Image (cartoon, rainbow, N blue to C red):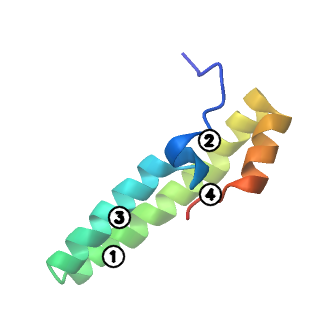
Amino acid sequence: DPPKNLVTGRLYRRTRNPMYVGVLAMIAGWALWFSSATLAGYWLAVALVFNLFIRIVEEPSLKKQFGKQYAEYCRQVPRWL
């Protein structure tokens, strides 16, 4: 079921996509820990896929569902960090 209310508190005050930011931070940490160019490349690929998915699928859906409330939220909170 889609959410009935737009969540804007806690982590969502800093970024509109805290789960994606967490996944990217984890992959970046692995890349640094293992000094791995392969993991760094994987991070880049995942970041690009996340960004495309958010822009093409998630944001239009949320704009349709929450309208002006979501538009205002987007003006106040960055997509990433």
First reached walking from the N terminus: tag 4 or tag 3: 3
Q: Is the Cβ of the residue at disc 4 closer than 8 Å to that at disc 2?
A: no
First reached walking from the N terminus: tag 3 or tag 2: 3
Percent x, y for residue 27? 29, 65
Q: Residue at x 35, y 55 (%)?
A: 23
Q: Residue at x 62, y 41 (%)?
A: 58
On the picture, is 80 further left or further right than 39? Answer: right
Percent x, y for residue 1? 54, 15
- CA gap between label 3 and label 2 equals 21 Å
Single out the mark in the foreground, 1 or 4.
4
First reached walking from the N terminus: tag 4 or tag 2: 2
- CA gap between label 4 and label 3 equals 15 Å
Alpha-carbon neighbours of circle 4 within 10 Å: few (<14), some, or many (≥20)?
Answer: some
Badge 3 marks a residue whose secondary structure is helix
Single out the mark in the foreground, 4 or 2.
4
- Residue to which mark 1 is pinned: 41
Q: Number of marks in the image? A: 4
Q: Is the Cβ of the residue at disc 1 closer than 8 Å to that at disc 4?
A: no
- Residue to which mark 3 is pinned: 25
Q: Quadrant of residue 25?
A: bottom left
Name of the residue lying farthest toward the front: 10
Which one is in front, 37 or 26? 26
Which one is in front, 17 or 11? 11
Q: Quadrant of residue 51?
A: bottom right
The correct choice, above or below, for 63 with respect to 49 in the image is: above
Which amino acid, by three-letter code, is at mark 3? Ala
First reached walking from the N terminus: tag 3 or tag 1: 3
Badge 2 marks a residue whose secondary structure is helix
Percent x, y for residue 36? 20, 81
Alpha-carbon neighbours of circle 1 within 10 Å: few (<14), some, or many (≥20)?
Answer: few
- Residue to which mark 4 is pinned: 79
Badge 1 marks a residue whose secondary structure is helix
